Image (cartoon, rainbow, N blue to C red):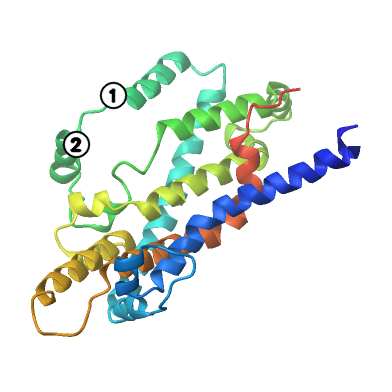
Amino acid sequence: MITRNKPFIAFMYVLMALLTIACLFPFLLLFMSSITSEATLAVNGYSLLPEEFSLDAYRFLWTTRKNLLHSLGISVFVTTVGVIANVTLTTLFAYPLSRKDLPGRNAISLFLFFTMLFNGGMVPTYMVYANYLHIKNTIWALIVPYLLMNAFYIITMRTYINSNIADEVIEAAKIDGASEVQILTRIVLPLSRPIIATIALLAMIGYWNNWTNGVYFLSSDELYGIQNFLNEVISNAVFLASKTSGSTMTVQIPTVAVRMAIAVVAVLPVLIAYPFFQKSFVKGITLGSVKG
């Protein structure tokens, strides 16, 4: 048996260790660059063992801590509400499409797939959201556009339900007198936890990393999420550095290190949340690979 082949097992352990190092290396390099002095980065570039350590980048971010916490709270709220809404709408759309007795099922699926290939473009989309839905300069501008529902997620969940929940189970529930709501809540949802967790993780990453909605639909920084705020911090750091470069001031704004520190701050919540989704994410992302 392959499990008793010790050389093969040793080789796989070494291979997995190398792949793990390859995955961790960018994050380690990112963090080490954020605690490197600006002068060292300018002269030597990025290094895992910098010649001069410095926390100037984090001190610079600390000066904006009030606004940083405010934008962080907005991002947490938007991500939480957005993920719940996204998963709810995806489930309510995918489950009916998985039923073979749904009238017009093929036409709806074709229309859904069409939206993955074509869209109205940025300007018409902006006009609809801003002029007709009136979400400009509101918190909904960070939740609704582009992220609220995704056709790919719907097709993925529909495929998972068709592949992993037998029609006989649903028919047996109907014979026992279960309504469609009871079938969805008591049978389909419990059996679909892996794909739900997968979609929730993908939606969370999408909401957390999104900054285009803030650029398009917000004209002030009061509703800025963490990504828009950190982008503004970078712009301010670059501006201050350009103003002090030709003066007699000895203070050096750590523009490059600030970028690295901002990336650390932005990616840290995702790294913390991922282990909680990992088991279900692996099951969901490999749907359909094994059929029996």
Viewer-proximal residue among 20 and 190: 20
Q: Position of residue 35 (x, y in %)?
A: 41, 74
The N terminus lies in quadrant: top right
Number of marks in the image?
2
Label 1 vs label 2: CA separation? 12 Å
Tag 2: amino acid: Met
Q: Position of residue 191 (x, y in %)?
A: 67, 38
Tag 1: amino acid: Phe
State whether residue 153 is above or below residue 231: above
Left or right of residue 156: residue 79: left
- Residue drawn at point x = 41 percent, y = 20 percent: 108
| Secondary structure of the residue carrying numbered label 2 | helix
Viewer-proximal residue among 136 and 243: 243
Label 1 CA crowd tier, 10 Å (few <14, some 14–19, many 20+): few
* Residue 276 in view (yes/no): yes
Left or right of residue 121: residue 37: right
Label 2 CA crowd tier, 10 Å (few <14, some 14–19, many 20+): few
- Residue drawn at point x = 44 percent, y = 71 percent: 50
Q: For residue 53, which quarter of the picture?
A: bottom left
State whether residue 273 is above or below residue 282: below
- Residue drawn at point x = 68 percent, y = 22 percent: 167
| Secondary structure of the residue carrying numbered label 1 | loop
Which residue was labeled with disc 1?
118
State whether residue 250 is above or below residue 70: below
Residue 260, label in figure: none
The C terminus lies in quadrant: top right
Which residue was labeled with disc 2?
122
Q: Position of residue 56 (x, y in %)?
A: 33, 79
State whether residue 271 is above or below residue 160: below
* Residue 93 in view (yes/no): no
- Residue drawn at point x = 44 percent, y = 60 percent: 267
